[in-house]
Image (cartoon, rainbow, N blue to C red):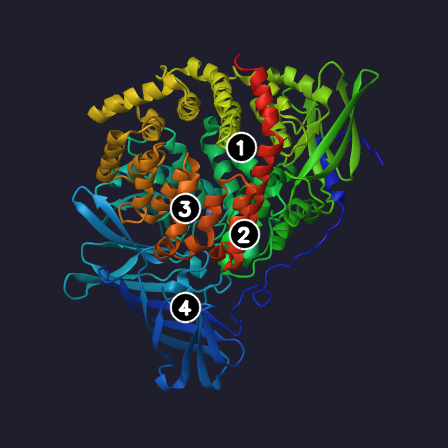
Amino acid sequence: MFRTIQVTAAALIAALLVGSGVSRAESGYSFSATAGKLPKTVVPAHYAIDLKPDLSTLAVSGSEVVDIKVLQPTDRLVLNALDMVLQSASLDGEAGQVAAITSQPKAQTVTLSFPHPLAAGPHKLRIAFTGRINRFGRGLFVVDYPTGHGRKRMIATELEPADARRIFPCWDEPAFKASFEPSVTVPRNFLALSNMPISHEEPAGGASKRVSFAATPRMSTYLFVLVAGDLERLTGDADGVTVGVVAASGKRAQGRYALDSAISLLRYYNNYFGFKYPLPKLDLIAVPGGVGGAMENWGGIVFNESILLFDPSSSPDALHRSIFGVLAHEMAHQWFGDLVTMGWWNDLWLNEGFASWMQDKAADRLHPDWQVWLNGGTAKQVAMDVDARRTSHPIQQPVADESEAQSVFDSITYSKSQVFIRELENYLGAEKFREGIRRYMAAHAYSNATTADLWLALQQASGKQVASIAIPYTEQPGVPLIVSRASCVNDRHRLILGQERFFRRPTNARSQLWQIPIAFGTTGASEPSGVVLMQGRTMQIDDGRCSTPIKLNFGDVGYYRVEYDPATEAALARSIEVMAPADRVNLLADNWALVEADRITADRYFRLVDAVVNDRNRAVLQQVISTVGRLDDLERGLPGRLAFQAYARSRLRPAFDRLGWNRAAGESEDNTILRSKLIAELGGLNDGAVLAEAKRRFAAFVKDPNSLDVNLRGPVIFLAGRSADRATYDELRALGRKATSTEERVRYYSALAAAVNPELAKETLAITLTDEVPLDLANGLILTVAAGEHLQLALAFVKANFEALAAKRGPTFRAFFMSSLMTNFADRAHADELANFAPVHETAGGRIMAARAQEEIIEAADFRARQLPAVDKWVAQHPAL
Ligand SMILES: [Zn+2]
């Protein structure tokens, strides 16, 4: 049946609500029904934890007193502990009560057995244990870092999803919330931080002190934090909360931008959530290496230093955007995740999707000139690519254990959720949506929630059905594809639309159906003509005059791809200049995805590229940059590569020639960012003039660092590394060794890891076996060598040294690293090799990531065989503009 609906946004909401009914109703949160492995007969209420870490032997001795509540009489307590020894345990002050302590290493648990069932009600459990400080960034770990006064050592924690059990015995699942009151013995010159402020400090013999912290509110174990080192703190006040930026001694001033941003954000969030940030302080802690990214521990967020500190003498202006983005994300988690936590990891999107959405919403509100939705569109494209594979998963997906939980931290959970939430906010209206969020926060504060609880809150606030719209997006995987066929009837367009699931490779997967709100409009219009809700397999739209084409997904807000008939596609390409930037990006991205899926030929995409060669918008040009960069990778080792590189240079050159090497007075920051990306890509495509100028500027920089604009340091130093000879390589390494800022250290080492010279690449790989750089950077160096010209070399190195590397880097490396490395390959033999590489198949999470990587490799292999010949043909026919 064909149906035509043309409606306003308000009518659309009404249409959405008719819905197709709830396909599968998840329940609201209940502790007893929540997934997890630990028995729910006993719950912890309060942990008093005392830790004595020895920073030279890396041993930790600890003790804890846990107030527990027995819900049902039981003769055993099962809790989590990993890589530690329980020396003694007693209940209610009686040592003899505990008959046996046994450990189950595979389940990461210990069991305390009692001769008689414990009576229901409160008890006090006391445990003495010894554990260790890790060298890899999980649990409690050590960070050795360079300073102007030699190397120093500090300790920090990273516990999500399930590494609190490496520090103290605990009920280490998100539903087992309790309060935590830690104390720690550290060197007297150290600053120690935890979730809450220090309550008491006292000498602890020798050069040590014992630092005690106030008790936290009820929270999940994975949000516990402990950091100590030679640190200093810069503070300010936001609505009565002390906000602090903590950094290695000497770097406090570089935290100014983060501090000011955090103060604005805290005020914005206090208002938005309608629930004031409940802790007395919020520390933003910069750790100089050892952690990748950032972690939202309640009251004590830990960041890799390079994404929190801003050094005006070396940081590019655009770093402000990254710092703000990560900060806004982690601070949103103080509510979404910390105050209200998902019951189990299957609902991780409630944390990550919301923090990702809120991060951009806050940036759009506080820095509208950044145009984050337009400029951040790459994340959406990545999510849609992942979601168009058979190994994709629904936003809500079952998670069996902790290793599987790690595999959920991906672009589906972050970016697809983010796009979906933005769509949902659009349809419910920003005010009603916020009211729903406020209800949800108030109803589940200091507790847990499920996705169903969120739908209920939004439904109550808006008076509208939410679940029926949302469930097709959150409970089934995949990207919808709208196939549009247009004809002209009485000088009006008639569009016949069909929907199906979009796959990057042909598949027999079962058919799926979504309710898709489709915005459409004539090119050149500032607003869409209308929004229709597509509910069935097909529908019809009549709109506009036949002289101007109709574009679907107007404004690029929707999560779906569109395939037009060839005549409409050609008409859209001709009028691309009058479209808004978001629609230009959308048209390019959809066409490229259709080429990758072998649904259309490459020339359709390249015609669009020719139409935007003189475009001035960064997001539009970045779509082209990323596509030609990907094609250049796929051409590796093939005879067409040189011609392709020449073609690609000719399409990027006009934009670079317009911008030039030097910043114009009053230039927009987007142009500054674009210049830097163009230089890096043109250099990668072997543009001789760009490489020569980069080399000249690098030589001048070595003599006088101030000679090189901070905004050009990234690309110039990277290209110097790429084309490095022995002398330049040594120069970069010396600069990297000398650097005391993580940002600079990463920049120098990443540059030398890109060296095309194979002897230098081997030397870089050898560095990763030593302690010269922190492990997170060392892993990055292997991946940079692989992503450059030395994939085979990198693979051979990792295989030859796998056990040594894994022993040093811990379980995350063992389970996942090989899968990330191998996605650089584009031939079936390597997909098979990964399938047979035993260590990645040891855990459920490792198997999931390996299967995804295999599909990605096979997809690239198929692309090389099927579509690259057409790319080469186009290039041969269109050598230069
Ligand atoms: Zn997050």
Which label's residue is closer to the chain start, 4 or 2?
4
Q: In this view, does 38 lie above or below 549?
A: below
Q: In which quarter of the image is the N terminus?
A: top right
Residue corresponding to mark 3: 796
The CA distance from mark 4 to mark 2 is: 32 Å
Q: Residue at x 52, y 81 (%)?
A: 73
- At label 1, the amino acid type is Gly
The CA distance from mark 1 to mark 2 is: 33 Å
Report the side of 633 relative to 236 (left or right). right
Ligand 1 within 8 angstroms of badge 3 C-beta: no
The answer to whether the residues at label 3 and label 4 have Cβ atoms under 8 Å apart is: no
Report the disc number at residue 835: 2
Report the side of 765 relative to 685 (left or right). left
391 or 203: nearer the viewer? 391
297 or 578: nearer the viewer? 578
Which label's residue is closer to the chain start, 1 or 2?
1
Could you tell me residue 409's position as x and y percent?
Answer: 50, 49
The CA distance from mark 3 to mark 4 is: 36 Å
Question: Can you see residue 790?
Answer: yes
Residue corresponding to mark 4: 81
Which label's residue is closer to the chain start, 1 or 3?
1
The CA distance from mark 1 to mark 3 is: 35 Å
Ligand 1 within 8 angstroms of badge 1 C-beta: no
- At label 3, the amino acid type is Ala
The answer to whether the residues at label 4 and label 2 have Cβ atoms under 8 Å apart is: no
- At label 2, the amino acid type is Ala
Q: Please tell me whether mark 1 or mark 2 is closer to you in this view.
A: 2
Q: Callout 3: few (<14), some (14-19), or many (20+) C-alpha neighbours within 10 Å?
A: few
Could you tell me residue 818's position as x and y percent?
Answer: 46, 49
The answer to whether the residues at label 1 and label 3 have Cβ atoms under 8 Å apart is: no
Could you tell me residue 18's position as x and y percent?
Answer: 76, 43
